[in-house]
Image (cartoon, rainbow, N blue to C red):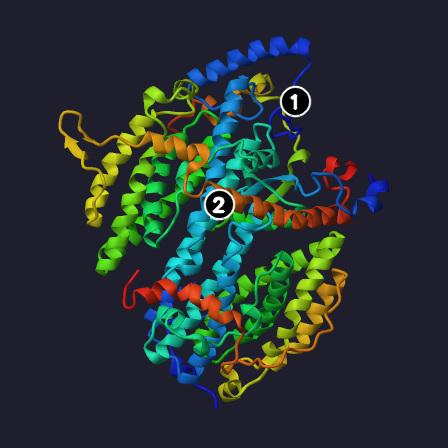
Amino acid sequence: MTTQNSGLHAVAAAEPAEQAELDRAGQEHFDRIIAEDSRIEPRDWMPAAYRRTLVRQISQHAHSEIIGMQPEGNWISRAPSLKRKAILMAKVQDEAGHGLYLYSAAETLGTPRSELNQQLLDGRAKYSSIFNYPARTWADMGAIGWLVDGAAIANQVPLCRASYGPYGRAMVRICKEESFHQRQGWEILHELSHGTPAQKQMAQDAVNRFYGPSLQMFGPPDDDSPNSKQSMAWNIKRFSNDELRQRFVDMIVEQAAALDLTLPDPDLKWNEERGHYDYGPLDWDEFKAVVGGRGPCNLQRMQRRRQAHEDGAWVREAAAAYARRTAPERAPAELIGA
Amino acid sequence: MSYASHESATRISAGTAITAEDIRAGGAKAPEDVARYALQLGDDALMLSQRLGWWIARAPELEEDIALANIALDLLGHARFFLTYAGTAWGRTEDELAYFRDEEEFRSCRLVEQENGDFGQTIARQLIFSYYQYELYRRLVRSTDPTLAAIAEKALKEIEYHQDHAGQWVLRLGLGTEESKRRIAAGLHYMWPYVDELFHDDELVDALGDVAVRPSGLRADFDARIRAILQEAELSVPEVLGAYGGDRSGQFSEQRGHILAEMQVLARQHPGATW
Amino acid sequence: MSENHENTVRPIGAASDEWPLWEVFVRSSRGLSHVHAGSLHAPDATMAVRNARDLYTRRNEGTSVWVVPSEAVTASDPDAKGAYFESAQGKSYRHATYYTKSEGVKHL
């Protein structure tokens, strides 16, 4: 892992002899902070596995925001009213912003964005599988906002209290901004379900397609989620996958009724005893296949990302060259000396 | 002929934050000629916004995705103001004007309809258009039509940013690498034939008097400022003559049909629907 | 560094398209100080300010932004060491709450 010298970010490693003592004191401090439910900050000592877990989780989250721009970006040019076009454009722009907040948090752990980006482009890093499904119709903009963003928010709200300070702070900002994302999605579906029969059918079809995958966004069932336990012990994760999924199902049942749309799950019913809605089994084989690269759009999403990166190389080079030419004393040393 | 300001009296006044909804709610009814003028301004902004929207998730860096989206959003906002106001003359909404006019009914200039090409070509178009719009709007704020003046005042602040964005990039591309210099020069060369028509006076402007801004009057300031920024970027003003066949009377580019086919397809599949 | 100036106008090396990291500070309204908001990448300070405005003030969150090259920030020792700030902890007489005799006396 690359370590940066920035005063705000991860600290460079010490001499080996000194390191053992630092590690012991560091672990003690770390454990105390976690026990107090306080926050770890970038220059604090932290276990290597904690750092690794965070870099993986935060960067996956960032990649999801960036890849997630594509299915919705696909509809900006065809949005059926100028108001909807403006809202959608602002939303997709927000997603780029959220990706940047998250990359910014990940970078405080010592891994530069270029490295994280390279992991994505090489296929070494994952992003949320939901974005490997196509956004075929305008109603998908509604379903993505309501269900996909809804699930994301349910996941993210507890992350605002994640033990790693920069991650929690990024999530606070993101959650604040995303509240409009879910509402605009719900509103799109509401317009459609109260519109013409063709519009209503479009809305129902989108909900049918996004319901299952959105429930899968919470991750595998608890008994099949090996990393969850450690993440919870570290106060990164606050609730289990199944707890969050249940919370989400309980919320959307009523919201669907208000939309006058149905959720495509015959097993969905109120369980008085549990005080929750029961829901049917999810297709985890499909989930694994899509995560593994067999989703309808995996290749297309990656191709588009790579293309943008490659097509932009000459622009980034030009700007870097201009910076060296006009203000060499202010450009970072590694760029000048290379 | 000029229109006395009371004819388009409106609750909109310069300096307040306005929205398309405010303009509609304001109850001002644009006179026919003013509406036709507003339509030109709105169509330019709409077409360019549609073009720039393509870049979102395709820009050279994520920060630039956000910058281009900002500019596209600003322009879409301007388009909505102008189309909403124009529509008051004919009892049509912004969406009816955007989605249910055919190619020959649009009044955009050819420049904004040109292909995005590479980033250099897009920035070349941004430079030309934002510098032109800046000259236009800083005069339009004194329009005797209060709604046009209010829209221009709101838009001007945003255009200043667009102009700065384009200028900063022209410097970086012009002075960056051999390749970037070649590409921005090619982009300018490609867009330059469509510069002349931006400054073409027509009967509508003659008729509108102090409501409108005479395009020909912007040329000297535009040329001086473009020359200055290109010089700073060590680029030259392309020596290309204006392309024949363009004015806003219904002549338009080959690309317009493609832009509209994409933009209007869904709305036209469901006429009368609300979204 | 300056002797390289002439030679560095052209891109060099594989990472010639990488932009450095900047820390962003936003003043949310007049009368308040600039507060650290996060970071971003930009080729130079001019673009960093513009990107900061686009990224961190999309919803009128700011009236002013500062950008600082991340490398230019010098921090106190890692927060874990704590001792650097402990000396301030023993000086409760620096806080108004230390002085209790005057309780109930107005305007003091």
- Compared to B67, does C104 lie above or below? above
Q: How many marks?
A: 2
* Residue extending farthest right: C3
- Asked whether residue B95 appears in the rendered view, the answer is yes
Which kind of residue does numbered mark 2 sit on? Answer: Gln
Chain containing mark 2: A
Q: Residue at x 70, y 50 (%)?
A: A318
* Amino acid type, residue under disc 1 in the picture: Ala
Q: Quadrant of residue A163?
A: top left
Task: Report whether residue B29 is seen.
Answer: no
Taking the image as shown, residue B97 lies to the left or right of residue A323, namely: left
Q: Which of the image's four quarters has the C terminus of chain B?
A: bottom left
Mark 2 neighbour density, 10 Å: few (under 14) some (14–19) many (20 or more): some
Can you identify the residue that label 2 sits on?
A: A300
The residue lying toward the viewer, choosing from A73 and A135, is A135
Q: Residue at x 55, y 18 (%)?
A: A48
C45 above or below A113? below
Q: Which mark is residue A12?
A: 1
Residue A108: image quadrant is: top right
Q: Residue at x 19, y 45 (%)?
A: A257
* Residue A230 placement (x, y as % from top left): 42, 18
Q: Residue B121 location, x and y as percent?
A: 63, 61
Q: Position of residue C72 (x, y in %)?
A: 68, 35
Disc on the earlier residue, 2 or 1: 1
Closest to the observer: A114 or C93?
A114
